[in-house]
């Protein structure tokens, strides 16, 4: 809407008729005081303001408008039949006007100017709305991000506390079961059930350890104690541990690196044990696992190959992602889907990398590499 401000009714009538004939909505004010009251109550796209008015003249009205945050962006066109001197025109621009038109008015010229400023005002209004909406969206997203971070922090804190609290009774359960197991003879029927219970306790312990490690990783609290150790011995020790746990599996080790590695030996052993237990888990029918180690460009490279269910090609890029679980068509496997994620993080902390090769239905080969000392 355009506000016409003039103390002469005939001038108002002429301008209003001209603008409304060209589909511009208008409003009028007969004095500067009335114009200011109206501007505070509603929004205008343009003000056509007479300079010479009794009481408050057009310059004073424009100065007040330009000094108010709510009205400073409203374009003002001055109209004057008397004050056509250069200093008056200059004052008009200095007081906040964007144009100065002298009377008698050329209707076509005035309409062109009105259309231009009206269009600019509408464009600015739309732009301001877009900016306002963007600011609101940014604030909303910041708030949502803060809430998500807080929720994540609380979740991690809960997981850490819960894992710690579960560890203690679980350790006691395992100790009591081991004592019972040692007191039984090999022929005792109960021993079978004790052995099965110990297996389930170990699985539960692994799940809790994975949860605790994941929580520590995400909070930057997983400690790494670096020492210098023989890498080939680590591979042999981890392999022997798995052989004792799964005596039915034929696990072979080929190759050597002949190097020392500087890193957290228990954590790197954890990675290899995870690879091996996964190989056992996902190859229930073919009980053969092949381990290869080699030195290449000063990097120790380990591969663990199984002949199990394999991983579909479309899923292979997701394997090291947190909570991802590979499901076979005929089997459901226990686990949280965080073991390989933890392995990947541990190897990355050692400046190495993890990857895999797999063919669905024929097995998988998991690799990791770490630099020599």
Image (cartoon, helix red, strand yellow):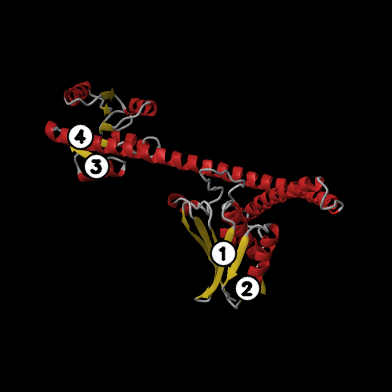
To which residue does mark 1 refer? 290
Looking at the figure, which quarter contains the N terminus? top left
Foreground: disc 1 or disc 3: 1
How far apart are the alpha carbons under marks 4 and 2? 83 Å
> x and y percent of residue 352 in the render?
54, 67
Do we see residue 150 in this rendering?
Answer: yes
> What percent of the width, then of the height, locates residue 71?
36, 35
Cα separation between marks 1 and 3: 95 Å
Tell me which numbered mark, 4 or 2, is placed earlier along the sequence: 4
**Element class at badge 1:** strand
Q: Looking at the image, is mark 1 or mark 2 nearer the viewer?
A: 1
The 10 Å Cα crowd at callout 1, few under 14, some 14 to 19, many 20 or more, is: some
Q: Position of residue 239 (x, y in %)?
A: 65, 65
Q: CA distance from mark 1 to mark 2?
A: 15 Å
Q: Is residue 72 visible?
A: no
> Does label 2 or label 3 sit earlier along the sequence?
3
Residue drawn at (62%, 74%), measured in percent from left and top?
261
Pointer 1 and pointer 3: residues touching (CB < 8 Å)?
A: no
Q: Earlier in the sequence, mark 1 or mark 3?
A: 3
Mark 2 or mark 3: which is in front? Answer: 2
Left or right for 30, reference 17: right
Q: Which of the pair 130/228 is nearer the observer? A: 228
In the image, which disc is placed on residue 115? 4
Q: Which residue is mark 3?
A: 88
The CA span between labels 2 and 3 is: 93 Å
């Amino acid at each position: 809407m355009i506000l016409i401000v003039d103390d002469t009714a005939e001038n108002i009538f002429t301008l209003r008729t001209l603008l409304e004939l060209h589909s511009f909505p208008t409003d009028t004010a007969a004095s500067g005081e009335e114009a200011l009251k109206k501007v505070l109550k509603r929004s205008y796209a343009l003000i056509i303001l007479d300079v010479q008015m009794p009481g408050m003249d057009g310059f004073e009205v424009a100065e007040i408008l330009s000094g108010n945050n709510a009205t400073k962006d409203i374009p003002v066109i001055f109209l004057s039949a008397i004050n056509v001197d250069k200093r008056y025109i200059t004052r008009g621009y200095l007081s906040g006007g964007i144009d100065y038109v002298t009377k008698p008015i050329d209707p076509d010229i005035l309409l062109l100017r009105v259309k231009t400023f009206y269009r600019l005002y509408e464009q600015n209004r739309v732009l301001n709305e877009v900016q306002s909406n963007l600011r609101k969206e940014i604030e909303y997203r910041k708030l949502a991000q803060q809430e998500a971070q807080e929720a994540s922090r609380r979740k991690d804190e809960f997981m850490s506390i819960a894992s710690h609290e579960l560890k203690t009774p679980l350790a006691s359960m395992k100790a009591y079961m081991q004592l019972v197991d040692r007191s039984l003879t090999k022929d005792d029927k109960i021993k079978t059930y004790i052995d099965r219970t110990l297996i389930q306790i170990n699985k539960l312990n692994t799940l809790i350890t994975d949860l605790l490690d994941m929580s520590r990783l995400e909070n930057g609290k997983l400690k790494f104690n670096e020492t210098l150790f023989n890498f080939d011995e680590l591979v042999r020790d981890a392999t022997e541990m798995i052989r004792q746990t799964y005596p039915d599996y034929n696990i072979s080790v080929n190759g050597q690196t002949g190097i020392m590695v500087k890193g957290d030996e228990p954590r790197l052993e954890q990675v290899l044990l995870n690879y091996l237990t996964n190989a056992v888990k996902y190859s229930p029918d073919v009980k053969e696992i092949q381990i290869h180690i080699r030195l290449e460009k000063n990097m120790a490279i380990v591969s663990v190959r199984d002949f199990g269910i394999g991983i579909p090609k479309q899923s292979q890029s997701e394997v090291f992602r947190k909570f991802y679980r590979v499901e076979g068509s005929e089997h459901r496997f226990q686990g949280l889907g965080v073991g390989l994620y933890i392995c990947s993080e541990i190897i990355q902390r050692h400046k190495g990398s993890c990857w895999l090769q797999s063919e669905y239905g024929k097995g998988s080969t998991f690799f990791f590499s770490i630099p020599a000392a």
